[in-house]
Image (cartoon, rainbow, N blue to C red):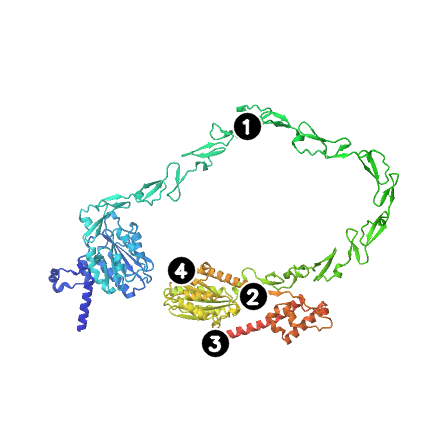
Amino acid sequence: MEKMLVGCFLLILGQILLLPAEAREWPPSRSISRGRHARTHPQTALLESSCENKRADVVFIIDSSRSVNTHDYAKVKEFIVDILQFLDIGPDVTRVGLLQYGSTVKNEFSLKTFKRKSEVEHAVKRMRHLSTGTMTGLAIQYALNIAFSEAEGARPLRENVPRVIMIVTDGRPQDSVAEVAAKARDTGILIFAIGVGQVDFNTLKAIGSEPHEDHVFLVANFSQMESLTSVFQNKLCIQDLCAAEDHGCEQLCVNLLGSFVCQCYSGYTLAEDGKRCVAVDYCASENHGCEHECVNTDSSYFCRCPKGFALNPDKKTCTKIDYCASPDHGCQQECVNTDDSYSCRCLKGFTLNPDQKTCRRINYCALNKPGCEHECINTEEGYYCRCHRGYTLDPNGKTCSRVDHCAEQDHGCAQLCLNTGDSFVCQCSEGFVINEDLKTCSRVDYCLLSDHGCEYSCVSTDRSFACQCPEEHVLRSDGKTCAKLDSCALGNHGCEHSCVSSGGSFVCQCFEGYILREDRKTCRRKDVCQAVDHGCEHICVNSDESYICKCLEGFRLAEDGKHCRRKDVCKSTHHGCEHICVNRGSSYICKCSKGFILAEDGRRCKRCTEGPVDLVFVIDGSKSLGEENFEIVKQFVTGIIDSLAISPKAARVGLLQYSTQVRTEFTLRNFSSAKDMKKAVAHMKYMGKGSMTGLALKHMFERSFTQVEGARPLSARVPRVAIVLTDGRAQDDVSEWASKAQANGVTMYAVGVGKAIEEELQEIASEPTEEHLFYAEDFSTMGEISDKLRKGICEALEDSGGRRDSPAGELPKRARQPTESEPVTINIRDILSCSNFAVQHRYLFEENNLARSTQKLFHSTKSSGSPLAEKHNQCKCENLIMFQNLANEEVRKLTQRLEEMTQRMEALENRLRYR
């Protein structure tokens, strides 16, 4: 019993000590006069001394963060209802508004919403707890800009109605409060700051008005708040000094506790006497930025430009007005801007007409009369004299002289040049006549002028003619007829091997095995290709004294000029590529069209979403998400699964959910069908606790991508992808395990929603982050992210498929041809040297498989009558391709059987799992 009495005493003493000084000083006379009847209900006492006819605009700002529990939130509402009891609420007296805030601000009701106290009480009681963050500064900013606006019911400042904020908070703000609170106080708003529990007292002082002992209060818990009710009754019901006194304020009077201050309208500042108002000279500030002239207005300033200038869009600088830019200036040639207009100007050689717009050419010849002998020609700036054809201008620039064309130019006459009126003509000397070109001369042909009598030919001389004979002939003594000579006997025939006379001439001939060259005198061997070891792989072609190598159709000559390569391997072989065949040296590779990737056989193509991928979802299941949004996340995961081909050979998918701990919903090996996987996603339970993102990434890196949990080995070169989805800040470090996963080949996609931290998303996402980081403001827009993410994964699989391109076929090298006596077999070394496909299928070359394949191969080739039946060319390309097709068929059958067995095993595992 003694302990209970001591406890009650300490509780009462603590509540008394929490109140400001004036709240604890009760007049002794009032205590004594009431006697034992002094213990009345608190609300009854409030009503007896209510703020009757008190004019005020009061806005409550209530902390509705998640740190305030349901019981404490109810205490806050009771406290507000108690305060309302002593307020005289009505449109002409006290108006009341209320905001509550968490991560955002919610306006429960404004100053103009309710006109009766009962309506306000009812609105307070039906308020809902927000249970989010603590954005205190944002709430004060909302009150300053919106709640105390005339549009929301606040009375104008000129009516001197006190403006009061009463803010209740229990935690440290997540934003800055000092600056916005100071701004609110400077506008005349009186702020009471009430802190509950572990609140930083310096933060409360940064919010509340001065003196702090009258406006800042701190209580231990929400239950003690009712002890402040009487304190606020005294604070809010004090006398309106602006109405009661001759305050002397020139423009506005603002009540304070027990006093008042003068304030000015916008555009004015308070004078040193604290009463008068002086207009603000905004242009006096050095940073107004006006280029030319600054002009003050009521609440700001504006920039002005001088005559002939216009204000730029930045409203500060000026640009000279280009009057000539208008198409209506009418100037024919040039337009020139002036200070406030424009003028027209003409080009050189022109003058302005009386209309001051069009131009006419200046006639300098008519104005100056220069005295040109032949012609006067006007120019842009003057004139010049010109002579008629056949004349040239004299040095005086006026008179003209005849031109000596033969002396002034390269006339081209072979013998004589004669001037004419405006040109010249060529002439010839005696014994010559002018040719058709009218420049050169030819001697007179005496053979044509007389009956020369020559047997073979006549040649003109200077003044006569002479007879001549053909080769191997001589002129007889009559000077006209010819006699034949033995050309070979003369010894100057030039034949390399032998000379044979023929009629009046001779011909050269070659020994057996040789043929005559083009000079018809020297000799060369008939077939160089047979005479030398030419080394041509396909064809040797004789070329004069040498040879050249050529290739068969479909081949081209190599750089050594002897060996041959196929021109287009893709066209010359049955490559088997489903989409595109690309030549690569002496072989080829298969590639796929956009949106497809290469299948495991190196030939077929499949859609990128059908490609192999190991994908792990890392899903945030923290309490900030909420069960409703968690269902949206499950739909998001299902949408990604629907876009993939789920099977052990294609896409394998696992899922982790994390909160304070990490839970594996299913691994990469659990499901082989999309239907079973989506059913597991639908039955996934929401964890709803903390947010240990780093722990989840560690679990994913160390366990999810192991072969034990179904990941394919790195040697299989299957892309590994992780999709991390979070809606808030992690409670641990994410960078270490995100970096390790990226360094080990895991492509990381980061999906952030709502309050997700951009820096953390960037640490999680792979480079480049613009392709691997996605953000949505809320969960309703996640559909857009789903489409982008599916596209990104598809493109990643395409890139991976491109890196896995490998030669689908190699051309065979030349091999030794077996003789007819050698057995018809294929040597394993020959096959390995001819084609690289055998390296991938060595098991086919075991004794039994090899015997069956070769027997089948050579049986088909012999029956078709191909050269292989005679020469047994194991390395001939079409034979190797046939062998390769047989090998591929065996591999296909084995692969199909293996897939059927795998599917049966997985189906059996799933049945056992869900029994």
Q: Which disc, if any, is residue 912?
A: 3
Secondary structure category for the residue under label 1 = strand
Q: How many marks?
A: 4
Q: Which disc, if any, is residue 758?
A: 4
Amino acid marked by disc 1 = Tyr
- Estimate the x, y position of residue 644 in percent, counting from the top left: 50, 65
- The quadrant of the picture occupied by the N terminus is bottom left
Between the residue at mark 3 and the residue at mark 4, the CA separation in whole angstroms equals 44 Å
Question: Tags 3 and 1 in contact by the CB under 8 Å rule?
Answer: no
Secondary structure category for the residue under label 2 = loop
Question: Tags 3 and 4 in contact by the CB under 8 Å rule?
Answer: no
Residue mark closest to the camera, 2 vs 4: 4
Secondary structure category for the residue under label 4 = helix
Relative to the observer, which residue lies in front, 792 or 126? 792
Between the residue at mark 1 and the residue at mark 2, the CA separation in whole angstroms equals 86 Å
Find residue 8 and report its image quarter.
bottom left
Between the residue at mark 2 and the residue at mark 3, the CA separation in whole angstroms equals 32 Å
- The residue sitting at 67% across, 61% down in the picture is 563
